[in-house]
Amino acid sequence: MNNNALTETKPVSIFNAAVIVAALGYFVDIYDLLLFGIVRTDSLKDLGIVGDAIRNQGEFLISMQMAGMLFGGILWGILGDKKGRISVLFGSILIYSVANIANGMVNSVPAYAFWRLVAGIGLAGELGAGITLVTESLPKEKRGYGTMIVASIGVSGAVAAYLVYQIFQDWRLCYYAGGILGILLLFMRIKINESGIFKKVAESDEKKGDFLSLFSNKNRFLKYIQCILIGIPIWFLVGVLITFSPEFAKALHVQGAETISAGQAIAWCYTGLVFGDIGSGILSQWFKSRKKITFFFILLNLAMVFLYLNSFEISTTLFYFICLAMGFSVGYWVLFITIAAEQFGTNIRATVTTTVPNFVRGLLPLIILIYTFFRDYLLDGDILYAGMLVGSLLSGIALLALWKLKETFHTDLDFIEKNN
């Protein structure tokens, strides 16, 4: 197929239906994704878990959720290229909404783990499908603004999850609320269309959604791995440093450490992330570069990790403010996913854009294993030095991967990946 044959006339407005639906879907996605971290302690206590088992079972449940996202990322990504971005967008919303409601009904850790696994599978599809649809629906000069809107509205779902928990003070009702929000979004039935780029490829004889093609070509494989690696510092910060902030606060002897709430730390972190996504999106448009701004944010993220883990005997107010600043520093999340979408052709773009962020999130169990190895076997239980060591390692890997990737700001997306 001639690449030029895929060229289309794209809408100019950055507030089109695709952006709105993707943003609202991601809002509910993040609500559910981070809700467990907010209700982790209270929900496990309610199920009869006490003491150190709360941390251990919490790590297990997060790992189950992320394992579901790893599997779901592959499943939804392939379906997104074969069946369309819109079908994946709404299908994933349906599954994680049902799983949310079921989570509110569990009475044991095994049942909790099963529904977190199912929720993870559902959560895996929305963001990748939404970002793919948005990047293909906007001209290259504006698509950075479109993905910025999706991310900034979406990540505020974490703040909503915390506020809902503060209102209801019942972890089961919080899960029910998330499920209902998703179902309501489906009932809205906002009319959106597939991008013209996808429609033309769908009508062609080109092989679509070929996940294995990412591994059959050396350059394509390396590019894919590099896209994944630049995002891993983000999830280490959110999945370990913020989610287990009460434990870190105690190790830092924060004044009133016993009052530190993981839910409040997550809310403050994601408030910062909203502004970080807006800031990184605007800066990438101003500087006409994804790589330069991502490089800056990775360095800022590493600096904030060291600040966080060396903030001894500070007040709880200052501790939460640092959580806010840490959230801002990982605001390159939207750029990281946009870069992935822009690196690959239309016939595997949804596969890449869906699997990349989910592989990052799905790597959390491995990140936790690396962190616990350093913490328990090399550093005699010192969680602070373990955090600094792992944070430095992951940031170094991310910077190297970013350096090897090409700049994609001016990339036209009307091209395909040849299966060779």
Image (cartoon, grey):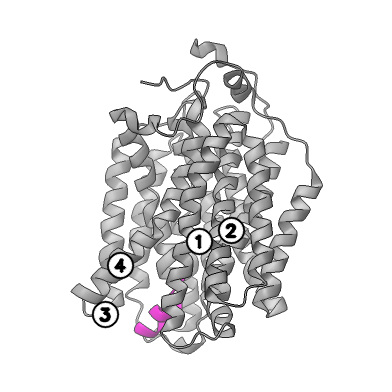
Observer-nearest residue: 385 or 239?
A: 239
The amino acid on which the numbered mark 3 sits, given as a three-letter code, is Gly
Task: Identify the mark at residue 216; answer none if there is no mark.
Answer: none
Task: Identify the mark at residue 381; answer none if there is no mark.
Answer: 3
Q: Verify CB contact (< 8 Å) between mark 2 and mark 1.
A: yes
Question: To which residue does mark 1 refer?
Answer: 65
First along the sequence among labels 1 and 4: 1
x 68%, y 57%: residue: 97
> Is residue 322 shown to the viewer in this render?
no
Q: Position of residue 23 (x, y in %)?
A: 65, 47
The amino acid on which the numbered mark 2 sits, given as a three-letter code, is Ala
Q: Position of residue 264 (x, y in %)?
A: 56, 75
First along the sequence among labels 4 and 2: 2
Report whether 359 appears left or right of 144: left
Query: Is 300 drawn above or below residue 334 in the view shown?
Result: below
Question: To which residue does mark 2 refer?
Answer: 119
x 54%, y 15%: residue: 205
| Whole-number angstrom distance, CA of label 2 to CA of label 1 | 7 Å
Task: Categorize mark 3 by other alpha carbons within 10 Å: few (<14), some (14-19), many (20+).
Answer: some
Q: Verify CB contact (< 8 Å) between mark 1 and mark 4.
A: no
Dividing the picture into quarters, in which one does residue 100 lie?
Answer: bottom right
Provide the residue span drawn in magenta. 243-251
